[in-house]
Image (tube, rainbow, N blue to C red):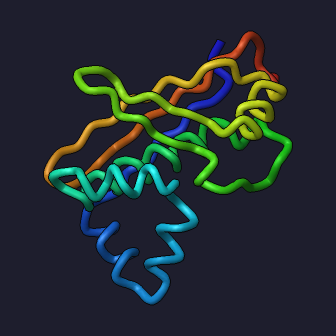
Amino acid sequence: MIVGIGVDAVSAETMQEKLSGPHGKDFLDQSFSPEELARACEAPHELSYLAAHYAAKQAVVKAIAPVLKATSFSLRLIEVKDKEGDSPVLRLSPQLRDMAHTAGVDRLHISITEELGLTICFVVAEGAGSQRSLS
């Protein structure tokens, strides 16, 4: 059963603006793990890579935040792992994974597309039952 859906879009231009601002380093440190930043440096298009991963994290937040008890959490608790020739994989920190599981989220599915510098990510949170009822 679907318990949450999230979508987000981030352009390479928007990412450049975030990084070139006065808090660009803070943004990177708060949004990405050291491993993600290292992989971004190796990517052919660093800004597009960061935009895709940031959009994915935001889509995850939108998919699971409504069912979580926590009002906020760090984006660093979400990591996007690239699998060559395969779909990307989302990895949640043990703490966030436990919170999501307790809230009824068993699996996350992600789709990422990029065209002309704009990345769109779609995340579906799946669980055994819904935390919300229709009224």
Residue at the image position 77 percent from the left and 13 percent from the top: 129
Residue at the image position 33 percent from the left and 27 percent from the top: 83
**Residue 132 appears in the rendering:** no
Q: Is residue 127 shown above or below 17?
A: above
In percent of width and height, residue 74 lies at 66, 56
Check the image and name the residue furthest to the bottom.
22
In percent of width and height, residue 23 lies at 49, 83
Q: Quadrant of the C terminus?
A: top right
Residue at the image position 40 percent from the left and 75 percent from the top: 18
In percent of width and height, residue 17 lies at 33, 77
Q: Is residue 79 shown above or below 105?
A: below
**Residue 104 appears in the rendering:** yes
Q: Nearer the viewer, residue 56 or 4?
A: 56
Q: Is residue 61 shown above or below 31?
A: above
Residue 1 lies left or right of residue 87; in this view the side is right
Residue 99 lies left or right of residue 37; in this view the side is right
Q: Is residue 132 shown above or below 14?
A: above
Q: Quadrant of the N terminus?
A: top right
Residue at the image position 34 percent from the left and 23 percent from the top: 87
In percent of width and height, residue 69 lies at 85, 42
Residue 131 lies left or right of residue 4; in this view the side is right
Q: Nearer the viewer, residue 131 or 103?
A: 103
